Image (cartoon, rainbow, N blue to C red):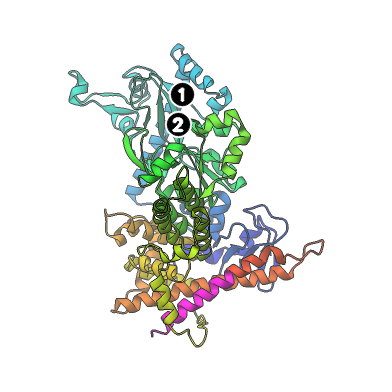
Amino acid sequence: MSSIDEIKSRIDIVDLVSESVQLRRTGKNYTGFCPFHSNTRTPAFVVFPETGTWRCFGQCNEGGDIFRFVMKKENWDFPEALQYLAEKAGVQLKPPTPAEQVAAEEHDRLRSLLEEAVTFYRHHLTNTPAGQAPLNYLRQRGLKDETIEAFGMGYAPAAWEIALSHFKTRGYIDKELIDAGLVSARTGEESHGRAGSLYDRFRNRIMIPIRDERGRMAGFGARILDPEDVPKFLNSPQTPVFDKGRLLYGLDRARKDIRGRDQAVIVEGYLDVIALHQAGFANAVSPMGTALTEHQLLLLKRFSRRIVLALDPDAAGAKATLRGLQIARQTLDRQVELAFDARGLLSQEARLQADIRVSTLPDGLDPDDVVKRDPGEWTRLIEEAKPIVIHVMETLATGRNLDDPKVKSEIANQVLPLVEDVPDPFERETYRQRLARLLRLDERVLLDERQPQGRGRSRSAQTRRATKRPPTSTPKVAVDSTEASLETHCLGVLMRHPDMVYRLDRVMQEFGLPRLSVNDFQHSENQTIFRLIQESLDQNAAEPLHFVLNGLSLPMMDKADDLLARTEKLDPVEERVFEDVLRAVLNLRIIFVRESLDYLRFAMEETDPQGVARTDDNRQSVLKYSTMLRNLNEALGRYTGRL
């Protein structure tokens, strides 16, 4: 038995959840009010003792096992939840390898050095004559002294070796200073006869500490004071503890407000984040000028599925959109090509099952300008944020002659592929109708002119489906197919054949179903492995299986070994393996949908204390899940019929 399985066997999920949620028995399950969102009407939170899982059928629409419950409740990652529950269960985890122990100690040492650097730069901002000018600049930007202190802002003196000398006297060696990103090595041209010597990376700049989502120091962002200096913003370099693509500035301070508002707002710069937090909008974060990565969205999704991109007009405007939805902009430490990639965002939105919207700022104004002018204006801008497809179609149409047939065709040809990328059939139909109204066209014209390369269901696909005879009976889930065994089988196959994820997604879209995602798995260790499988497909540095195994902690390696052992003897015909894993995924979803419908029927029979029926709150959800169940059964019938 692995340590994860042993923990699950020792901790009763009802006891664990009951520590913070008042549960009442309903048949063989337990219900209560969800601890992760505000609700006093409907007990939408259900605990299933037999499977050791829980699910919120309300606003969260999430679920999982004891690990996922603790992760969501405490905002922890899986290793943190594993350590906590292992101690609670009295299970001894395997000790880290010597290499892991050395790396952890080195990282702790670097974070300690960076914390001392915060104090060093803070002193030079507030307690030296040279710091008066940058302090006045920050005050002129509208920042209060308590805000400057809360965010740990500082000043790097205009000297080449003052930080280097300070930290050397504190006992830090050259390698540690380089690894922390505080100093750089001179090249031949820079050395002036001192080749190989070190110098301060940050000079005459406002220093902004960057922390990870847990509040641990990772690096710095530095803004110029002298307009002649370049670049305008300079980040810490890539270090063992600083990776721009895996960090969001301000998330350590924003995560509570993001959860409270159930919304995260992404802005471009550090000072935008700080000004918004000062004004009471503490759900703002920044990707620090880099293109938004899926890892950053996954970080945000831990706290809310509702995400708004607050873009300036250059990024979201008509000119940028018409040249392929791409922008080039001066970023933190070099000139790079950033992209407002509507198709990429739609793909991420579908995979993450998130709600990503776009808001455009007024011309010439940054978020801090808007919130200083009128906080209510900022609130309206975020409330009026539009879905990605609607933002693109309206941006393309702004200022255009919509009576010109060629303009209509140009806009339709750019928007329709995006519409076809949307996995939800109801959303696709709504966007088509909206585009038809915008262009003053009959919607049937748009249906006829859809792009053949669209990833939604094409006319030929619909024709093929129409000619197939429906199954004579509705396939049923096998009695002995439990969620745990189905999840185990799916992951074992996908670890060996990760490219099947693409084929599964195509079949799902053909039947109007969402793509495969981590939410198809209820057990946290399975979610972790599936997320690594997805990441393995987006890299070329290692074989996918090696990438997955290298990304696992020691306790998780036991789980991975078990998955691979269970799927060692697969059918030699790959097509049969694919159909087998597809049926397993469909059965998993059928179990979930039936559980959802059972809960909704129970909720519709309940009444609140005033005796008002809750059916109106749940009728739309019943319709949604009924449609999904019909599509699942149709897909399962299609592939069962091939046997």
- Left or right of residue 561: residue 210: right
How crowded is the residue under tag 2: few (<14 C-alpha within 10 Å), some, or many (20+)? many
Along the line of sight, the residue nearer the viewer: 221 or 420 = 420
Which amino acid, by three-letter code, is at mark 1?
Gly
Question: Does the segment drawn in magenta span residue 632?
Answer: yes
Residue furthest to the bottom in view is 472
Q: Earlier in the sequence, mark 1 or mark 2?
A: 1
- Left or right of residue 12: residue 159: left
**Residue segment shown in magenta:** 625-643
Which amino acid, by three-letter code, is at mark 2?
Pro
Along the line of sight, the residue nearer the viewer: 308 or 45 = 308
**Which quadrant would residue 25 be assigned to in this image?**
bottom right
Secondary structure of the residue carrying tag 1 is: strand
Judge whether residue 46 can be spotted in this image. yes
What numbered label is drawn on residue 98? none
Circles 1, 2 touching at the beta carbon (< 8 Å): yes
| Location of residue 140 in the rendering, given as x and y in whole percent from the top left corner | 53, 19
**Which quadrant would residue 529 be assigned to in this image?**
bottom left
How many angstroms separate mark 1 from mark 2 (CA)?
A: 8 Å
Along the line of sight, the residue nearer the viewer: 566 or 643 = 643
Question: Does the segment drawn in magenta span residue 579?
Answer: no
- Left or right of residue 524: residue 146: right
Q: Which residue bears the numbered disc 1?
A: 154
Q: Which residue bears the numbered disc 2?
A: 209
Secondary structure of the residue carrying tag 2 is: strand
Residue located at (41% from left, 80% from top): 639
| Location of residue 244 in the rendering, given as x and y in whole percent from the top left corner | 38, 40
Along the line of sight, the residue nearer the viewer: 150 or 79 = 150
Residue located at (37% from left, 66% from top): 501
